[in-house]
Amino acid sequence: MEERQELPSQAIVQADSAVAPEGTLWAQFLGELGKYGMYRAAVGGLQFQQRGESGSRLFVISPTRLRDAFVRDIAYHRLRGDHVDPVERLPQWFLDGLFEFIGAIEEPYDHRFVVLVGLQFQPADEEQYALRDQGTGT
């Protein structure tokens, strides 16, 4: 994954109008996550337990973080001169990535946390989670 530069605020403002409201994206995300197991609100995100598994993971995500990831992605691609379609719903490729990530989870878990890096889910350990929560992680 390539390193992304700091985005100008004007690019963020322009990209913001191309992304659906938080509630729309969040409802779709929760609906998709519910297909694979049970989740509940927890400090820092969503505690998720896959069907048939005894352990769980914390998805470090919120409606704002989810939407902001799409806004930043659109801003980044527009600055590069790429054509980017508005995000009215979670794109199928994003949902496919969630499915593939969950399908790759096996017990015992090496990592207790799942973070959204760019628009990809990645496992994280407690140290990475703490750094990300402080805004200093990747």
Image (tube, rainbow, N blue to C red):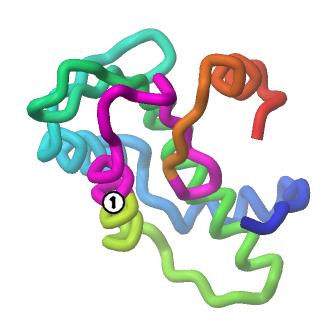
Q: Nearer the viewer, residue 113 or 20?
A: 113
Q: How many marks?
A: 1
Task: Indicate the position of residue 105 as horizontal and vertical percent values.
Answer: 34, 42
Image quarter of residue 93: bottom left
Q: Is residue 116 magenta?
A: yes
- Left or right of residue 14, residue 79 in this image: right
- Left or right of residue 70, residue 49 in this image: left
Q: Residue at x 76, y 22 (%)?
A: 131
The residue carrying mark 1 is 100
Image quarter of residue 81: bottom right
Q: Residue at x 84, y 62 (%)?
A: 3
Task: Indicate the position of residue 109 as horizontal and vertical percent values.
Answer: 40, 28
Task: Indicate the position of residue 60 as horizontal and vertical percent values.
Answer: 50, 29
Image quarter of residue 71: bottom right
Q: Residue at x 70, y 88 (%)?
A: 82
Figure quadrant of the N terminus: bottom right
> Where 108 falls versus 22 (above or below)?
above
Figure quadrant of the C terminus: top right
Question: Does dot 1 land on a helix, a strand or a loop?
Answer: helix
Q: Is residue 101 magenta?
A: yes
> Where 23 falls versus 69 (above or below)?
above
> Where 108 falls versus 64 (above or below)?
above
Q: Residue at x 62, y 48 (%)?
A: 117
Magenta stretch, residue numbers: 98-120
Task: Indicate the position of residue 61 as horizontal and vertical percent values.
Answer: 48, 33
Instruction: Spot the residue most to the top.
Output: 43
Question: Label 1 sits on what residue type?
Answer: Glu
Q: Residues within 10 Å of mark 1 (few under 14, many from 20)?
A: few
Q: Nearer the viewer, residue 130 or 13?
A: 130
